[in-house]
Image (tube, rainbow, N blue to C red):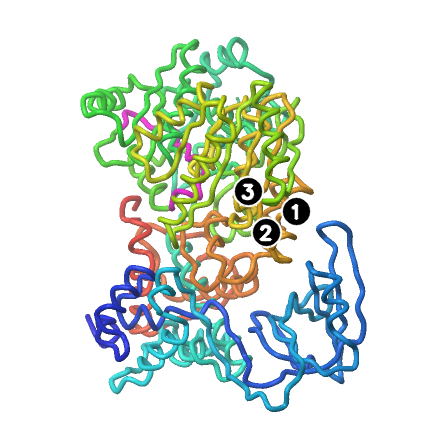
Amino acid sequence: MSGFLDTDIKFLKGVGEARAKLLSSQIEVVTFRDLLYYFPFRHIDRSRFYSIEELTGSDIPAIQIKGRFISFRVEGEGVRKRLIGVFSDGKRLMETVWFSKIKQFSEMYKPGIEYVIFGKPNFFHNAWSIAHPEVEVYDPEKPPTGFRGVYSLTETMRKRGLSTRIIQTIVSNLFEHRQFPTIQETLPGQIIERYRLMPLQEALRQMHFPTDVRSLQRATERLKFEELFYVEAHILRYSMERGSKLPGYVFQTIGEKFNNFYFNVLPFQLTGAQKRVLKEIRADMKTGRQMNRLLQGDVGSGKTMVAFMSMLMAVDNGFQAALMAPTEILATQHYDSLREWAEPIGVRVALLTGSTRTSERRKIHEGLLSGEIQIIVGTHALIEDTVQFKALGLAVIDEQHRFGVAQRARMWSKNTVVPHVLVMTATPIPRTLAMTVYGDLEVSVIDELPPGRKPITTLLRFDSNRMEVDRLIVAQLREGRQVYIVYPLIAENEKLDLKSLEEGYKRTCETFPSFPVCFVHGRMKPEEKDHQMELFVSGKARIMVATTVIEVGVNVPNASVMVIENAERFGLSQLHQLRGRVGRGADQSYCILMSKAKAGGDTKKRLAIMTETTDGFLISEADMKIRGPGDMEGTQQSGLAFNLRVADLAKDGQILTRAREAALAVLRGNVSLLAQGCTPTEVRQGDLEPIPLSPEEVSIIARELTLRFAKTVDWSLIS
Ligand code: ADP
Ligand code: MG
């Protein structure tokens, strides 16, 4: 069914061939519909002056307030030092905050003069405040400029003159088009009524051209609700009841291999947390129900060993086990560790990745089918259809945020009985969120690091401190240590990024001429990448200049310095992951965050958190609090396989709860929407009133679910 909204964007007034190419290549806007859903990432309301009194709710756009500064004070120390100005609109007070140029600002703004401050208000510590507002002396002659959306644009678009203004114009042309249709509602009328939601048609228009703040808030809320409603419906629809519904293999015995390994091979003492988690896993795997467990543990907490010993439980009971990693490098490294541990006890481990040769691959396929290979380590190659097991008893997935639910489902489909599944992640997902999103997923936490590790010293440094940083690096290299230097890569401008990486490599070679440097980035051929990684792992290269390909899991205990360039361009959780690459040996390690000297308030605050704590859970919490709306990292950091466009799980918990309730009520009232063979306990039990729908509404929901999730999950494989 193709209609007006499926029209090629080039036919829209004001677009044409050239711009259409730009829109599709840069921001994936190909059809009228894509443009309609390409929302501004923020809004600016300069249509009038607001009073402090009328501010309510979240998601307030940048607005202007007229008034006077009453007083200034300085709070905090060091990087947390800030200037707070108390601002009055004549009726109420609010705060303005500056994290830099404190002296300058405190002298610049005079009490008694009437100013207009402009910025996004946040409600914080029981008061409204605007951080780093734009401040102008009030000019009664200046005309209001309206309420507008600001669209996210790439460098390339800007360079070719495709501005926010132009996007506004073409979006407006779209709405004004003679044939612009009535947009079909995507939520059932009863849901819209019950939750007092703005209808879709109106919400879409308000997102682009808001009439006032309240309407914009309601439009945003409506779209968030809708998004979360479908995520929840999707999950509930497929969440399977465990127990009688999903039988699991029984691993009755702790056998010879496990004991042999534990008493004769295990190179260190397990931490208390590792022991506890192993007990939890063991208890799970002998119940006769399928285990579906999320193993959270900070970087370096020793998840791999837990995985390996769980795999031995499978092997001892006559089953095979698989470990799937997100990258070839990681898989190879896991393979190396596992082989070292498994060989002495006579357990056969094999590696299967995209670059495994055909002849070797065939042998592995045979070995898996005959059961000769007991443990297989690999990448996505493991879920290819040709891979078959004699008896896969346990599937371990490392760093789950790189895999979608789809891949998990495919792993399961390898057997008639679903194998036990252990998902390992260093990304802390708040437990409540994990439950909401995964339903029946059990969570284990390794909350203890192996002993003898010195805390990593984290330093925030600027370009002006280069010499000092270089000296520290040289000192460490002279002591025999190894060093990582990491650059961010941002898809927005790949060429420029690669250039800065290459320049960094050149500079590193010149600055440390007596130490071999290797060079790794994501767009290298796998063989070349492996070769470069190998140089570092073996110690032949002493410095590695890289992009975030090293982010997950590389283990080089001799590395003691992690330099992160343009640290402000990384999320905190990502910085934490990177930092976890050092501090794995007994030596003092350093993490140096390099940033622009001019970094603004929020950036400094964020980076300062890294210097204050090494607790991954605290960091992710802080990250969630500080991050602004529409942050692209949101979904990745929460470990979700879904791409959320408007909702932010860290902030929209309340909407999530309501959306989940609505989804539950709808599924309860329309069991035909449930996936075949799935009857989640939750859908059957509880006292939430079902919402029965008309057949048309049911088909709308079914269609939306397919549209939204067809690409992410092929669930037919598990039913
Ligand atoms: P992660 O949880 O980040 O995957 P790894 O499994 O890579 O961590 O473990 C990090 C390092 O700590 C590895 O070198 C591993 O061999 C080592 N390790 C794991 N458990 C212990 C322990 N109980 N005592 C000492 N070292 C350990
Ligand atoms: Mg790991």
Give the x, y percent position of residue 471: 62, 30
Could you tell me which quadrant the N terminus lies in?
Answer: bottom left
The residue range painted magenta reads 389-404
| Residue depicted at 39% across the width and 49% down the height | 496
Decide which of tag 1 and tag 2 comes sooner along the chain.
1
Q: Which mark is residue 623?
A: 2
Give the x, y percent position of residue 672: 32, 62
Decide which of tag 1 and tag 3 comes sooner along the chain.
3
Distance in Å between CA atoms under marks 1 and 2: 9 Å
Q: Please say whether residue 415 is visible from this viewpoint.
A: no
SS for dot 3: helix
SS for dot 1: helix
Q: Looking at this view, is 64 or 183 the one in front?
A: 64
| Residue depicted at 37% across the width and 25% down the height | 332
| 24 to the left or right of 498 | left
Q: Looking at this view, is 609 or 714 the one in front?
A: 609
Distance in Å between CA atoms under marks 3 and 2: 11 Å
Mark 3 lies on residue: 575
Residue type at the position of mark 2: Asp
Residue type at the position of mark 1: Ile
